[in-house]
Amino acid sequence: MADTSDFRTGFTLRFKNQLWSITEFQHVKPGKGGAFVRTKLKNIKSGKVVEETFRAGEKVDEVRLERRAFQFLYTEGDDFVFMNTETYEQINLPEDTLGDVPLYIKSSDTCTLLLHEGKPLSVEPPLTVELAVSKTDPGVRGDTAQGGAKPATMETGLVVQVPLFIEEGEILKIDTRTGKYLGRV
């Protein structure tokens, strides 16, 4: 058991019979009444974000999650097959449990799996990925006053706004947290 003084970003707790991760928290000490902690909690399975308030010193059930490196191998029907890089054990995960992760990974990319009691909860892609542009319109010079952007479809199906000078076949660095173009490789 932990209490609200142990809260930090990334802290995982069991709340309302589900696993939640703290994304933001703030200790509040009003002039009148007792102190409390205002938090934003993200559901680990569904990704839903809620705001909750806890009284200062309130006990919560802390959950320890394991983070392990797994390599994405291939797809098998609707399942994505990942391999533990240490033990070579393979895990099949259904596509609908991965969210938008399949848009950022390709074969042999290394991802982080969150495990609770040996069962996979979620997959985190690397912070940045390098993907090839499979389709984009040709950019026309001089048609904007400020730079400008156009949509580009990457090899995984991800659509990203890129500068006008990007052409098909180029390899780009993409931030997986925001889905934004970072530069050419």
Image (cartoon, rainbow, N blue to C red):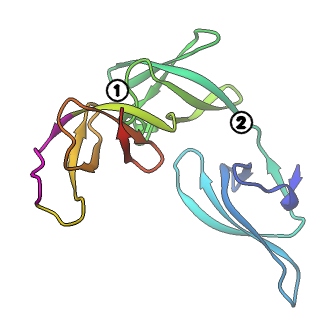
* Circle count: 2
Q: Residue at x 84, y 61 (%)?
A: 4
Instruction: Determine whether the residue tagged by mark 1 lies in a helix, strand or loop.
Output: loop
Q: Which mark is residue 59?
A: none
From the top left corner, tell me how far across and down residue 89 is, in percent: 58, 11
Image height of 39 relative to 90, above or below: below
| Range shown magenta | 134-142
Q: Are marks 1 and 2 in contact (CB under 8 Å)?
A: no
Of residues 37 and 150, the one drawn nearer to the viewer in this rendering? 150
Tell me which secondary structure the magenta stretch mostly adopts. loop
Quadrant of residue 103 within the rendered picture: top left
Amino acid carrying label 1: it is Asp
* Crowding near the residue tagged with mark 1, few <14, some 14–19, many ≥20 C-alpha atoms within 10 Å: few
Q: Does the magenta-highlighted stretch encompass residue 175?
A: no
**Left/right of residue 110 with respect to residue 18 in the rendered view:** left
> In the visual, does 66 lie left or right of 149?
right
Question: Which one is earlier in the sequence, the residue at label 1 or at label 2?
Answer: 2
Rendered image: mark on residue 65: 2
Any mark on residue 78, and which?
Answer: 1
Q: Residue furthest bottom?
A: 32
Q: Position of residue 173 (x, y in %)?
A: 38, 37
The three-letter code of the residue at mark 2 reads Leu
Closest to the observer: 104 or 21? 104
Closer mark to the observer between disc 1 and disc 2: 2
